Image (tube, rainbow, N blue to C red):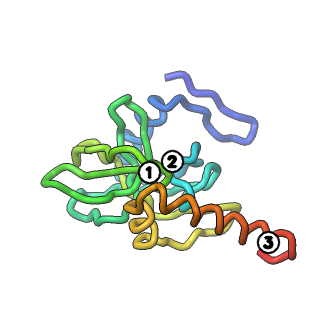
Amino acid sequence: MRVTMLPSGQLKLSGEEFADLSTEVIAASASIRFRARGGSMSPFIRAADVLTVDPVRPEELARGDVVLYRSVGGRALAHRVLGRRGDRFLIRGDGSTGKCDIVSCHEILGKVVRIDRDGTMVPPRRMLALAWARMPALCRRPLVACARALRNLHRRTGRK
């Protein structure tokens, strides 16, 4: 594994290297923190949010939880649990409209227990996010447009 240390003191890893490191850390019953990348979990988790993942036993997982798991391509992904069938979980990103990933309980590395955005903890919205993830994509688009318009209005008026 080739690890690059950034001037900020953070590590720069490839997707597979991060998956390997996460597997080792969580197997040692420790938590791991990392900066989210991409938009697959938008709007509930954004790129640059800092996620904290703890080890978890499969029987502790519930619909709506966000898990870190090893994908078919060997990368570690953080996506939402939409359901369970025996020892397999149906998992998909909140921003995704495609099919769910079917993930064995052995591929789940841990559960996201905390989300920090700009130094502030983001409150969990598990049930709202679960409803969002199950909503057809055509219904989401107008809601996203309304949310953006409201956010822009608040920014222009100086409210946060």
Residue 50 can be seen, yes or no: yes
Q: Is residue 98 left or right of residue 8?
A: left
Q: Are marks 1 and 2 in contact (CB under 8 Å)?
A: yes
Looking at the rendered structure, the secondary structure element under dot 2 is loop
Q: CA distance from mark 3 to mark 2?
A: 25 Å
Residue 27 can be seen, yes or no: no
**Mark 1 residue type:** Gly
Q: Residue at x 72, y 67 (%)?
A: 149
Q: Residue at x 50, y 64 (%)?
A: 114
**Mark 3 residue type:** Leu
- Look at the picture and state if 68 lies above or below 141: above
Q: Are marks 3 and 2 in contact (CB under 8 Å)?
A: no
Q: Give the residue number, with chain letter if any, for mark 1.
A: 93
Number of other residues with Cα within 10 Å of mark 1, as a class: few under 14, some 14 to 19, many 20 or more: many
| Quarter occupied by the C terminus | bottom right
Number of other residues with Cα within 10 Å of mark 3, as a class: few under 14, some 14 to 19, many 20 or more: few
- Look at the picture and state if 75 lies above or below 100: above
Q: Residue at x 21, y 57 (%)?
A: 84
Number of other residues with Cα within 10 Å of mark 2, as a class: few under 14, some 14 to 19, many 20 or more: many
- 88 and 116: which one is in front? 88
- Mark found first going from the N terminus, 1 or 3: 1
Q: Position of residue 10 (x, y in %)?
A: 65, 40
Q: Give the residue number, with chain letter if any, for mark 3.
A: 153
Q: Give the residue number, with chain letter if any, for mark 2.
A: 40
